[in-house]
Image (cartoon, rainbow, N blue to C red):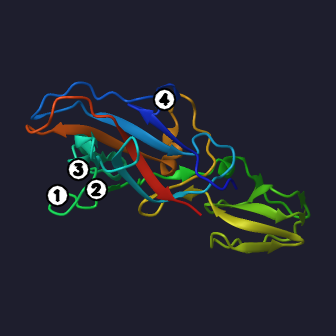
Amino acid sequence: MANAPIVSWYQTNNDKANEVKNTVNYGTVDADSESLQFTFYIWNNRGGTEDCSKMEEVVFTTRDREGGTGDTTGAIVEAVRDNWFNVRVDSLSESAFTPVGKGGVGTANPSGTKALGTTGTTTNPKGATATVWSAGASYVLGTYVRPTTANGYVYKVTQAGMTDSTQPIWTTVEGNTLIDGSIEYEVIRIEQTPATQEILGFANNTLDNGSNANLAGGNFCQVTVYADVPISASAGKNLLVQRVSYRYV
């Protein structure tokens, strides 16, 4: 498994042609008004052929270009310092927006961050291609096997060998080891849903046009973002970064 998550962003929809690689321009916004709303899809391991680490404790915020909270003397970024940007996590079916940025005591969101996540489910593509178990068969390392009666799990060969004359009792405790003749399997659930504040990193067959992205729904979150500029805002350009932070094992 790759050590690090493989993160990419897409704007408006899940078409790979819409990958965000440059600056996102929210346009000119008058004081005491709101910008247009922008939707982003934040992925881990899009189209990856091998699993990578999941993203854990995932949060969204804004920071100035130096990674600060926009309050550095001589380099003020009001949009960050004063929490102009608002985020809604669509992949959690949220309806309300949360301001992000510096945060601070007395603000609507003192932490300045917004927890991300998704209720989507990622379907392991090996579930459709796994070899149906048979007696006395030789399986090499890395082969995926499924019971003759589907049970929602696949079994990855971690020690090559030959199967027994009768099917094993197919345990459904994910991550456990199962013995079958001289073979050892790792137990893997076919459909995976991330825990709170997680984005999965499982391999998936997501198409470039994103039409089957729902099959990797646990590998991305969807957010909508806009800027709410107060009447007290100064004229000028605000340059900042939208930041997703996470940890991984």
**Residue 220 location (% of width, % of height):** 47, 46
Where residue 99 is drawn, which disc sits there? 3
- Of the numbered discs in the image, which one, if any, rests on residue 112? 2
Which is more toward the observer, 248 or 124? 248
Judged left or right of residue 99, residue 143 is right
| Mark 3 and mark 1 residues within 8 Å of each other at the beta carbon | yes
* Mark 3 vs 4, N-terminal side: 4
SS for tag 1?
Answer: loop
Q: Which residue is mark 4?
A: 15
* Mark 2 or mark 1: whose residue is earlier in sequence: 1
Residue type at tag 2: Gly
Q: Nearer the viewer, mark 3 or mark 1?
A: 1
- 167 sits left or right of 89 in the view: right
As measured in the structure, the alpha-carbon distance from the residue carrying label 4 to the one carrying label 2 is: 30 Å
Query: Residue visible at 88% across and 57% down?
Result: 140
Can residue 39 be seen here? The reply is yes
Q: Say whether disc 3 or disc 1 marks the residue closer to the N-terminus.
A: 3
Percent coordinates x, y for residue 120 in the rendering? 45, 51
Q: Tag 4, which secondary structure?
A: loop
Amino acid tagged 1: Thr
Tag 2 near tag 1, CB within 8 Å: yes
